[in-house]
Amino acid sequence: MDRWEWAYEGYEPMEERLREALCTLGNGYFATRGAAPETDAGGPHYPGTYVAGCYNRLVSTVEGGEGSAARDVENEDMVNMPNWLPLRFRILDGTPDGTPDGTPDGTPDGTPDGTPDGAPDGGPGYLPGGPADSPVSGLGDGSAPSWWTPDDGGLLAYRQRLDLRHGVLARTLRLEDAAGRRLRVEQHRLVHMGQPHLAALRTVLTAENWTGTLEVESALDGGVANEGVERYRALNGRHLTGHSTGSTAPDTVWVRCRTTNSEIGVALAARTRLESGEAVSARTDLSGVRPARRLTVAVRPGRPVTVVKTVSLHTSHDIAVSEPLHAALEDIDHAPGFPDLLDTHRAAWDELWRHAELEVPGEAGHILRVHLFHVMQTLSPHITDLDVGVPARGLHGEAYRGHVFWDELFVLPYLNVHFPEVSRALLAYRHRRLPEAVRAAEDSGYEGAMFPWQSGSDGREETQTLHLNPRSGRWLPDHSRLQHHVGSAIAYNIWQYWQASGDTDFMHTRGAETLLRIAQFWGSAARYDADLGRYRILGVVGPDEYHEAYPGRERPGLDDNAYTNVTAAWVLGRALETLRTVPEPLCEELCLKLGLDGETPERWDDVSRRLRVPFHAGVISQFDGYGELAELDWEGYRRRYGDIRRLDRILEAEGDTVNRYQASKQADALMLGYLFQPAELAGLFERLGYTLDDELWRRTVDHYLHRTSHGSTLSSLVHGWVLARVRRPEAWRYVQEALVSDIADIQGGTTAEGIHLGAMAGTLDLVQRGLTGLETRGGALRMDPAPLPELSEFGFTIRYRHHWGVGVRMRSDRMRVSLPGSAEAPVRLVLPDRTVTVEPGESAWLDLAGR
């Protein structure tokens, strides 16, 4: 497979939804899954289209289990928009060349003209690709043949090819119907990266051995719902209402609707033109909520029929738009033909790749390019004009309801040094929701800002209070909203963005306000324990997610989660630094606005030095009391169940609970090694009054390595990152798993519901930061390389401060850092054993032998 291509040979219905997710095309504004245009939602297909930031809220009635009463549940979802893809075809009549009346050679005697009894002469009553000797249902009463779909059979060849360089999905197929008529179909699809409201589909149909007529229908389907996740299907998914349809000119149809609660207006317009071929007739059908344009065309062997569908999508959330339908029709009226659209689309993608150059050899490099492609088309520079966060599953499906979690922690470090304007926009999403986070903290008795674990349109907590265990069929309490460490992730990203970009305008205003509000929260959440002489943070849930409560305790939450406490201490330290560095007039304004008095810095400093970190058996405890939990029979469960990634569901279905065991879903305490380089982490522990040496950290890594089920795609990423510095020979196994987690769908169906954006971006950052030790801290580029033997040669470019295109090249035991020519200041490069200054226009080769 070409390194710029991701391709699938053959049609596999069981894999279709996975392929749809991985062949999604998008531009940051909207994205469409890679579904076959001939298909509707259902069975192996789900053609979803999603606009960034467009949510709607619905109430569903959930039946209570085991005699409990039904209850209403409210959920906000990213809305599945009207489907613009539908383009289907059917053979109306025609005969294979050289075969009278469409009769295949060698038909059995006794069948007049080679047609089965009851079928009309000439063979037009056969479903293309249908079962042999089986006429299309209903044809005997004069009705038209059925529309073809890939599930009808008769495929001679089928190939999908995703052009990663230029964001084009190509599809080629050959089919033969029961009458022996063969048809070749070639399609090219794009969601325009330069003009974010446009998409296009070019279809070329070529008869290989017959003459006749073919009908093509190009439609917009407004009757869609959110039905892409099986476990949500018992809930209300009808988000669109108020449909109207119409047509303009002879070739354009449109559909208009709105969301039921958020009242977002949505409009799509589709122009369908016959670019080559002979039209016999054309008509428009505006019945129902599926406006369509139907073309009947004459076909002859070897003469292609080309149909181009150009689509515009607008919503009332768009800027500089007075009415979505007017904007959509204006776009269509001025949209050029497919060749020009393709040229400008390719040019826009070329520009993106110039800012995100990544060269990794072999299969790993190929997969990383797929990951980078999906990151860029979900979070392209177009989002700088949008109010959107980082959807955990991209714009690729409906899992997690399109909500924003903490996944930006794994995404922004990559974007900071390639597309800092995108990082700034994503951080602005959080700042706009700061008032809601302040209200949430106040309602819970805290100061500052308590950000939600799941966020959507307005910043309120979107985490469900119930979740379904598919294994047991029971709805269970969901306490994951206690993952308050999401605030620390936001603060971390603000700080990292500032260090990489030098954007003091943002940092001294919105960045500082958000970070200080989060510090306020941790300062008020910490409770002093006189017996321990330390501060404690009680009743939280850590990144592990399995453990939500102590066994036998009714109150949910855990005490002194190590990750939560250490990152809270870090936030408080950065807040104190912010107060020192923000210009005095701005600092005074901030302190007045936030209600910070002269005693606040003193308390924050005290808490940041005396937050408790629990230990047991010579390792860092995930939380207080973790060491007292029972050990799990890991091998026994693997023998019984095979895949135990979702150990929590397995145990609950058995009537047990994972809360009783030393068993984690994903990295928790080890996340500290993901966020902080060894020296910085040791410094954090020293500030807290603890000693974290290499041996203690190695014991901690080993302890949790054998007690983690890796129920999240992020887990392998973090373990591979950490092991690259602690137990290098074992790291590659986890890195490999992180690389293939989506393309191989290792969790058995989850990728089909949407890719894991954090895991994809995290693998990119593993190369960029994890293996190089790259940090943008203290006004310098810091490097502490730890290359893996399997990934020892690679290269990438980054944007650091005002230097565009800083090149980093690893070559086994050497590293080169080069700066493009400019009038900017030189860059100070800090390694553990030396400091090097690189001038603009120069390169520095650094010998890493012995490291």
Image: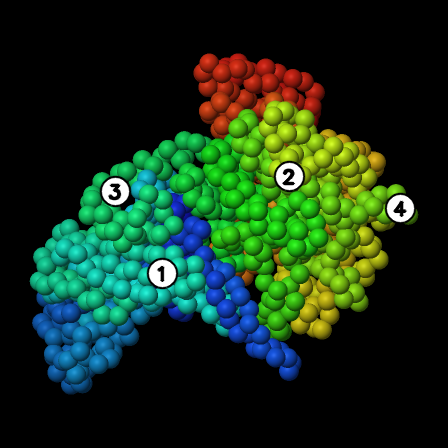
**Between marks 3 and 1 in the image, the one whose residue lies nearer the viewer:** 1
Reading the chain from its start, which is encountered first: label 4 or label 3? 3
Can you say which quadrant of the picture contains the C terminus? Answer: top right
Mark 1 — residue?
Answer: 258
Residue type at numbered disc 3: Leu
Reading the chain from its start, which is encountered first: label 4 or label 1? 1
What is the total number of numbered labels drawn onto the structure image?
Answer: 4
Residue type at numbered disc 2: Leu
| Alpha-carbon span between mark 3 and mark 1 | 28 Å
The reply to whether dot 3 and dot 1 touch (C-beta < 8 Å) is no
Reading the chain from its start, which is encountered first: label 4 or label 2? 4
The answer, for residue 49, to whether it is visible in the render is yes
Circle 4: element type: loop
Reading the chain from its start, which is encountered first: label 1 or label 2? 1
Q: Residue at x 13, y 57 (%)?
A: 250
Disc sitting over residue 530 in the figure: 4
Circle 2: element type: helix
Residue type at numbered disc 1: Arg
